[in-house]
Image: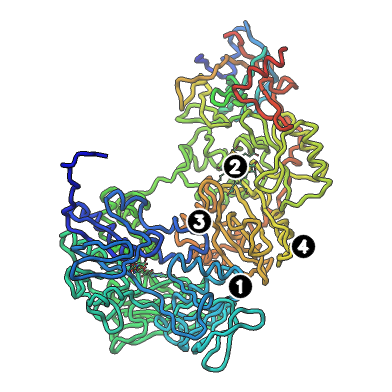
Amino acid sequence: MNQDKNLSVPVDRRPSLIVIGNGMVGHHCVERLIELGAHHHHAISVFGEERHPAYDRVHLSEYFSGRDAASLALGEAGLYADHGVVLHLGEKVEKIDRTTREVVTLRGRYRFDRLVLATGSYPFVPAIPGSEGDARLVYRTLDDLDMIRAAAANARRGVVVGGGLLGLEAANALKRLGLEAHVVEFAPRLMPVQLDAEGGAALAARIEALGVGVHLSKATEAIVAGENGHRYRMRFADGTALDTDLVVFSAGIRPQDGLARDCGLEIAARGGVVVNDHCASSDPAIYAIGECASWRDRVFGLVAPGYRMARLVAERLAGQPSELFTGADMSTKLKLLGVDVGSIGDAHGASPGARSYRFVDERSASYRRLVVSEDGKRVLGAVLVGDNSFYDTLLQYVANAIAAPLAPEALILPAGEGAPALGIDALPDSATICSCHNVSKGTIRAAVDQGCLDLASLKRETRASTGCGGCSALLKQAFEAELAARGMAVDASLCEHFSHTRQALFDLVRLEGIEDFDTLMRRHGNGGLGCDICKPAVASILASNWNRPILDPALAPLQDTNDAFMANMQKDGTYSVVPRIAGGEITPDKLIVLGEVAKKYDLYTKITGGQRIDMFGAELHQLPSIWAELIAAGFETGHAYGKSTRTVKSCVGSSWCRYGVQDSVAMALRLEHRYKGLRSPHKLKFAVSGCTRECAEAQSKDIGVIATERGWNLYVCGNGGMRPRHAELFATDLDDETLVRYIDRLLMFYVRTADRLQRTSVWRENLDGGLDYLKSVVIDDCLGVCAELERQMALVVERYECEWANALSDPEKLKRFRTFVNQTQGDPGLRYVRERGQRRPARADEIPSVVSEESA
Amino acid sequence: MTLDRSEKALDAESAGQWRRLCSIDELVPGAGVTAWCRGEQIALFLLLAGSERNVYALANGDPFSGANVIGRGIVGDIAAQPVVASPLYKQHFRLADGRCIESPEIALRTWPVRLRDGWVEIDMDS
Ligand code: SRM
Ligand SMILES: Cc1cc2nc3c(=O)[nH]c(=O)nc-3n(C[C@H](O)[C@H](O)[C@H](O)COP(=O)(O)OP(=O)(O)OC[C@H]3O[C@@H](n4cnc5c(N)ncnc54)[C@H](O)[C@@H]3O)c2cc1C
Ligand code: SF4
Ligand code: FES
């Protein structure tokens, strides 16, 4: 706008720093540069070929289980812009011109003084005739996953070429997408890099048991047109073939070193930009970090070493003292298709003189191998298949060179044999707790000293456990040990009346058989009347344990607003009435009754978001007669008022729908009738879909069930509402009985351990050990509580009784349903207007006219 | 309105403007009910402390929602002061003087109460 010709454009005289690649490592480098203030002295620009800003590739697969690009994004939005870092997304660097010191894209040339290559790697796809389109998919970026999803939409079977870590992860993803999944591996075993022959065999057995086809020692020669209704056929060198509808290649990764190669930087024999201990390339102005770098002929395909490189380069660029890169531990732990796999240190026993202990359990297809030094004094490595509970301890032995126990084999023997758990106290201050962010035990101690007194702030401050997440259990231990060492405890009191958590109160009620509030207050409370926090919480705990009618005299005064009158209070103090319509299925006769009752009492009527019918505007004294009429017609309470089971949404399923593979309505009815009346820390919503089209939206529910050809897939801990969360796949192809058993256990475990007003989604997110832990409790019974959880659920189910029917049969209870104790009239303060043929509460600005209308 | 609310103390007061609302059996220990008197809606709460019965009478109208619902709130105590929580938006009112804990500039009307011959009586004109 300024016309003044003398004003010259300010020239940015700061040295220009360009980062090529906005992946995990490139992003980490930028974050660290900003942290160190390097953006004040450098003009920083970042080029990323992908459309998305840096995201968490490690958790890429969660894109198929509910997370979207935004939730996978790394770092705070606006971080770059706020610090003047220019991000060029969707702009690929085509060329580096080292003579002019410029990078070249299709949009322009950009000068650099310092350059950081963080271009990662690309999936290697072997040249196979006929491999194109949906027979040539890869698994690396969000866009790749979109393509796989699109290809899967019309597919029944999918094949992954490559039985390594990522290949199995891709097979898992195909399974999640509802396909029959197969893995084709060139080597004679799965995960050839990490596992030895026995470990590979144990893993293959486990994975085949899950219904994933495993084809070993297969070299794909060609892909041709498919038969038997499949799109493609893979022809193998041994003469066999496999039909499929799509093929995903996961046959290894290659460093993305083309730019460096073309501009004459030194490239390692097996690929990758050669870097020294400072991560500088053969041109000292150019660094390479992450998967594109080759250090002493090694390329690191994990995020932790990449992060370490990113940090030390950032430090150098910011002119700070920086460490040297000294290589990295390639230990990994993961859960593939629900099977634990772990590989630590020298897993193959390649060190001179190394000896091994092996433990094999063929029944459960578990395998463990422990590699120790020749003198037996050091643990060098380990392989785990089937049970990763040994991982953390073993990793600490290896990483911190802790002296092995006298009988090292105890480290891999089944629990109960006295495997010596390695307490956090045994670790030195220098022990790494989080390898992604290089956080040591000493750093955690310092952070607690500086006032991080809860886990969230500790994570924010140290960044521990914000990478791959593998260290979360260890971090929590370390944190709690630090608190304990300071004599501190986290205050988790329910309210001023109880210095216990909800979970502790729940256990006290159950163990001591307490059935009323006063006894609990006397024995475990701080005295007083209680309040609107502890009373409803205790009412819910008592109901979950004993399931007595909630209006029994000792219980009634504890109930929350809506429970107290078994109806939902509306803004004007009237109530809504929601009878149960299990599964959303209703006969015409019952529909007519609802219409008649609503008409008789002039109730505003609406279909709810939960597949049932809500009738609004009943006064307190009208509730009993309304319910008497509904119950006479065969209805029962819908618990719309309770922190309890709400609805089980269903789709019509195989009884009518041409795609349905199971009777989803029947299953919805079974679940709704089983869990109705279960009171819980918060409300519970379920849904059952009859096929993968998912018309019942089960993946947004606390408990979601989706029919498969072979049974049911169970999804858990989803949430709609304010903070939507997709439910996670918990178990697949369950028969009816197993499905119900798992739900029994999971719900009762939630009821016992959640905080008050904590939905399953939040509970699950706060659960240490996450979904894996939940599975081990519910499926593997690692706590040995499943029988009791089932018993407790059986009691609740057995004691079910419609609360409204119970209240109607008891004149004492009915006394509470009076608008006035000394008058039969209703509340004269209520004002209504009619709109679209029904009544609704008048708004404040409508009231004068209503009044004058009445008085006219 | 600082009354000693034990039954004895209430009984000792003189019967001037006292009006009978309902039988004492209509009250629910640890909770509220609502009565009607001369166009007013009155929320009545009964608290038991040992052998003592303390009764409180507050206006039933909730100033925050405009709805007549106070008698249906949960009774409890905050820092040893008996309170009722409005069932709609959960503000707390002290039973003793109707004062709102969250917004002390607001208070519900209260009336003196007494128990006599099995009846709950309030002084409407006070
Ligand atoms: C009636 C209904 C809206 C409608 O007209 O469709 C409704 C009405 C209310 N919802 Fe809802 N919700 C209704 C379906 C839903 C759904 C959809 C569903 O169930 O499929 C959701 C999102 C799904 C979910 O919960 O995950 C939903 C998420 C909420 C939330 C947010 C919960 C969360 O975890 O974020 C609240 C607030 C809360 O519970 O704390 C809420 C709270 C409420 C309350 C109880 C608010 C209140 O305290 O007054 C409303 C009173 C209900 C009443 O008077 O009957 N309602 N509410 C629906 C009753 C369904 C039923 O048949 O029981
Ligand atoms: C499915 C999956 C699961 C994984 N699980 C784990 C795990 O559990 N643990 C673990 O440690 N690691 C895991 N990894 C590996 C981990 O994701 C990588 O180690 C990490 O992402 C490497 O980071 P990077 O920045 O080097 O490369 P990337 O994250 O690949 O980033 C490189 C970026 O550079 C961009 N780029 C390349 N060339 C150019 C160019 N010329 N111009 C502009 N931009 C360019 C690319 O588009 C890309 O966005 C997993 C990987 C995948 C795919
Ligand atoms: S979305 Fe809000 S307004 Fe609508 S029913 Fe649910 S709680 Fe009430
Ligand atoms: S080890 Fe990966 S987040 Fe800590």
Residue B27: percent from the left, percent from the top? 66, 25
Chain under disc 4: A
Rendering coords of residue A310 (x, y %): 26, 65
Q: Chain of mark 1?
A: A
Give the mark nearer the N terminus: 1 vs 2. 1
Q: Which mark is residue A655?
A: 4
Q: Nearer the viewer, mark 2 or mark 3?
A: 3
CB atoms at circles 4 and 3 under 8 Å apart? Answer: no
Q: With respect to residue A24, does A513 lie above or below?
A: above
Mark 4 → mark 1, Cα distance in angstroms: 24 Å
Q: Residue at x 33, y 78 (%)?
A: A345
Q: Is residue A698 toward the left or the right of residue A437 in the image?
A: right
Q: Say yes or no: labels 4 and 3 on the same chain.
A: yes
The answer to the question of whether label 4 and label 1 lie on touching residues, with beta carbons closer than 8 A, is no
Could you tell me the amino acid type at mark 3?
Answer: Arg
Tell me whether circle 1 and circle 2 mark residues in contact (CB < 8 Å). no
